[in-house]
Amino acid sequence: MIDVVSSGAGWGAARRRERAARDEEFAAFVAAATPRLRRTAYLMCRDWHLAQDLTQLTLAKMYASWPRIWRTADLAAYSRRVLLNAVFDLRKRRSHTEVVLADLPDHPGQSGPPAADLHVTLMRALATLPVRDQAIVVLRHWEDHSVDTVAEILGVSASVVKTQSMRALGRLRDLLGEDFARQ
């Protein structure tokens, strides 16, 4: 009877060690992936607070799946997909007609730094695109992923990524003008 109890206690300790190892792996993943996820979320929603919420939601969903995926999945790709699904779900649930700004706009006649104006102009133009086109432009041209990687992340074919990217960039050029890219 003592052998049964002692072997059961050893099994419980092994499970605790395995869980502790998984939790350490998750903590390392969070430290490495959070800045990238937050930046991608911000580019998709243009609100740092909402981007932080979306990042936290992504990490919570990742933690729930962690025992299943921690050794087998491409964690960077999996986390991007979870984040983009959260963004798509958010867009389905609420209207995005309001643009949230951290600071009130300057008074007319006052000029801010040119780089900030350029950034705001680009972000506003990006916001006019449909959400999937935004995702393609952000993943393809901001995060510099290949067409095949973007297609895999979004669950579409490479030809869809190429076509929608071309159309989205054309819309951005129409909105911003040809001279915008030369600035």
Image (cartoon, rainbow, N blue to C red):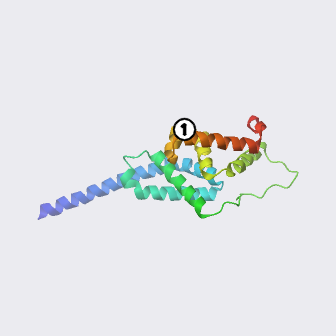
Q: Return the residue found at the far right.
A: 109
Q: Quadrant of the N terminus?
A: bottom left
User: What type is the residue that disc 1 sits on?
Assistant: Val
Give the x, y percent position of residue 178: 76, 37
Nearer to the camera, 29 or 7 = 29
Q: Residue at x 39, y 49 (%)?
A: 70
Give the x, y percent position of residue 14: 27, 55
Nearer to the camera, 122 or 165 = 165
Image side of residue 98 versus residue 58, left or right: right
Q: Residue at x 85, y 55 (%)?
A: 107
Q: Report the number of numbered marks.
A: 1
Q: Quadrant of the C terminus?
A: top right
Circle 1 SS class: helix
- Residue at mark 1: 147
Please identify the quarter of the rendering in which residue 64 is found. Answer: bottom left
Q: Return the residue found at the far left.
A: 1
Q: Return the residue found at the far top.
A: 182
Q: Residue at x 34, y 56 (%)?
A: 19
